[in-house]
Image (cartoon, grey):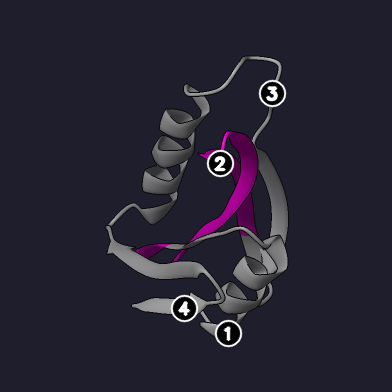
Amino acid sequence: GVYRYGKDFIYIQAFKSNEADALLNKYKEDLRRDFRKDYNPFEEISINGHAATKFNDFRVENGENKPIYNIVWAKGDYMVQVGPSYDPMVAVTLASATGY
């Protein structure tokens, strides 16, 4: 689904996989390649009682780098991604609202 919050269009995507944890690890590995080796874009957090990862990226807007956030996690047969959002708390709140 897609949700609008202010100027953000925030997506909730669920990817079904027999190996959701492996899919999440591969996804994070692929994302990591886009950044300098001395920068860690990931922060481990908890959503609805399970581990999740907040991913921090940047977009250029009006000549300025602006941080943008996604939340990703694996549970059962799904990898779930919520984002992007310019406000990390909006991304976390929406991820928690999934109840998953």
Residue 42 as seen in the image, left or right of residue 5: right
Distance between mark 3 and mark 4 Cα atoms: 30 Å
Q: Nearer the viewer, residue 63 or 59?
A: 63
Disc number placed over residue 4 in the picture, else none: 4
Q: Earlier in the sequence, mark 2 or mark 4?
A: 4
Tell me which amino acid carries mark 1.
Answer: Ala
Marks 3 and 2 in Cβ contact (< 8 Å) = no
Residue 96: % across, % down: 62, 78
Q: Quadrant of residue 40?
A: top right
Disc number placed over residue 62 in the picture, else none: 2
Marks 1 and 3 in Cβ contact (< 8 Å) = no
Residue 22: % across, % down: 40, 44
Residue 55 appears in the picture as rendered: no
Mark 3 sits on what residue? 39
Distance between mark 1 and mark 3 Cα atoms: 30 Å
Mark 1 sits on what residue? 97
Residue 31 as seen in the image, left or right of residue 53: left
Identify which residue is drawn at 49% across, 62% down.
Answer: 83
Tell me which amino acid carries mark 3.
Answer: Tyr
Tell me which amino acid carries mark 2.
Answer: Asn
The single residue placed furthest to the front in the displayed view is 62
Distance between mark 1 and mark 2 Cα atoms: 32 Å
User: Element at badge 4?
Assistant: strand
Distance between mark 3 and mark 2 Cα atoms: 24 Å
Q: Nearer the viewer, residue 44 or 10?
A: 10
Q: Earlier in the sequence, mark 1 or mark 2?
A: 2
**Mark 2 Cα-neighbour bin, 10 Å: few <14, some 14–19, many ≥20:** few
Residue 95: % across, % down: 57, 73
Q: Earlier in the sequence, mark 4 or mark 1?
A: 4
Identify which residue is drawn at 33% across, 78% down.
Answer: 1
Between disc 3 and disc 2, the foreground one is: 2
